[in-house]
Image (spheres, rainbow, N blue to C red):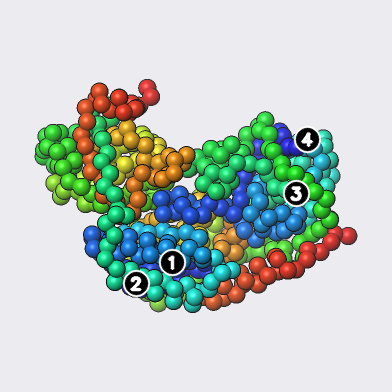
Amino acid sequence: MSFEVVDPGMLTLVQDLGRFGYQHIGVTTGGPMDEHAFLWANRLLGNPLNAPQLEITFGRLSLLAHSDTTIALTGADLGARLNDRAIEPWQTHEIRKGDRLSFSMPVSGLRAYLAVTGGLDVPARLGSAATVSREQLGGLDGSGNKLAKGDRIALGEPRPVAKASVPYSEIPDYRKPLRVGVIPGYQYRHFPRSVQAKFFTSEYEVSQNIDRMGYRLKGEAIHGDLDGIISEGIAYGAIQIPADGQPIVLMKDRQTIGGYPKIGSLSALGAGQLAQRAPGASVSFYLSDVADAEARRMIFNHRLRQGAPGTAG
Amino acid sequence: MNIESINESACIVYLGDQINEETAERVKQATDRIRATLSDVITDLVPSYTSVMVCYDLERIDRFGIQSRLRRAVTGASATAPDPSSAQTLELPVYYGPEVALDLDDVCEFAGLTADEVIRIHSEQSYRVYAIGFSPGFAFLGSTDARIAMPRKSTPRLKVPVGSVGIAGSQTAIYPSATPGGWQIVGRTPSKMVDWDSKSLALAQIGDRVKFRAIDRDEFIRLGGQFDEL
């Protein structure tokens, strides 16, 4: 049971929820850039929520199925086709041996998630299959490689799954300008009130400089009263403000510790929405708090676990 | 001590605001205590110079619960005598030869000292592991003698060879993997700083002490040391 990689596309990586418990020796978590989409893909198939999937960035991936299985596709619409038929994200699709699954270009969003019943059968390194190329960890053979032409992706044992789709209310529109809550924290109080106000009323643009480590934004420069800080742990979604005043949101492959002042942090779900934005997209921030982030996450977790996915018509 | 929320599943415990041995010891003790008493709810711990970031499972505990348990764990830690058995002293062999000490000449010029003097100063003291980060197993050691505390290079190297021993200001460190980096490279160790197939994974842990032992070219080769692939 496997998929064969006919064309690896721009960047296709094996990801599970991430590598936990090793940040104290400098190993980053990795994991899906958009947890919301990743978790729904496993949920649609009734997989364990941590089952390894493919994270497809920007598209152009082409796979040949060597066995029958069911997949779930969530996240970005990257123009997926099953043989010569266009297929929609946020639902399950049956795959037959000999089918060709291919992606073209982003229609909306940047990163699609492809889960397979039974998960991808890949080795765990330090307890996780998450690919972090920089650290040579995770992926198909455990050594941090992205997918390459000719790779064979081993699949777990498929079982029959009901046709399912994600409830419409849970499907984000990645084309909308993103407005995302910031939890004040870290060095927040070292940014004067007027600077905080500027930060929360400005519109930022996603720059060309975005990767799995961080999203660099362009817009109003923000300057606090600190030049640097003593290096400390960096959370997923933390917003660093370097000397040029242009915010950098730290993503899944961030370094574990760093020394730039931070104005606060996005929630994991908020950072996931940012991860679906391509260069040129508009981002603005509002002052939120940890209670709000906590509540939203608990509601999401509840819907994911309790709310039965709707059945596609 | 000050505990602050970062997001819905992380908070940070500040244990001081100066880089020194005393704060480092508090960080080490707090980390050990948190690991020992909160393992049912924490997913990751990121100790650094003056703080510990604590990542937790929101499904198991919320911000109020974690803060109260952290307060109890850390306050208990400061009342406990340091446990000397948990910190080890590592002796790392270092070859300071010209083939691998890429910036030793620059450090000599900066310090106004001979190579032998720089090597003696660098290897005669023991350093504390203040933080681990930057890349897996990259241990920030301090503090270097002021005479050899040369600032990092203004243009970083695109690739620093594995095992390189560098100086950056009052810190010294070993590159566990080949990464870009701007530290002044004065030698190379044949010791493997990270080994994902070993039980300990990373040779140095926060709170450990590291001492460098100058070795000659023959010993470097005998211990498995590698020169740059040319």
User: Which chain's residue wears label 2?
Assistant: B
Q: Mark 2 points at which residue?
A: B76
Query: Where the N terminus of chain A falls, by quadrant?
Result: top right
User: Which chain's residue wears label 1?
Assistant: B
Q: Distance between the residues labelled 2 and 3?
A: 47 Å
**Where is residue A64 shown, x and y percent of the image?**
76, 36
Query: Looking at the image, which residue sits at the far right?
Result: A313
Three-letter residue code for mark 1: Thr
Q: How far apart are marks 4 and 2 (CA)?
A: 58 Å
Q: Name the residue under label 4.
A: A66
Is B88 on the left-hand or right-hand side of B5? left
Picture layout, residue A94 above or below residue A90: above
Give the label, 1 or 3, closer to the camera: 1
Q: How far apart are marks 4 and 1 (CA)?
A: 49 Å
Where is residue B91, by image quadrant? top left
**Where is residue B100 shown, x and y percent of the image?**
28, 30
Which badge, 3 or 4, is on the more N-terminal residue?
Answer: 4
Q: Distance between the residues labelled 1 and 3?
A: 38 Å
Three-letter residue code for mark 3: Thr
The lab-note entry on whether marks 4 and 1 share a chain reads no
Q: Mark 3 points at which residue?
A: A117
**Where is residue A76 shown, x and y percent of the image?**
69, 54
Q: How far apart are marks 3 and 4 (CA)?
A: 14 Å
Number of other residues with Cα within 10 Å of mark 2, as a class: few under 14, some 14 to 19, many 20 or more: few
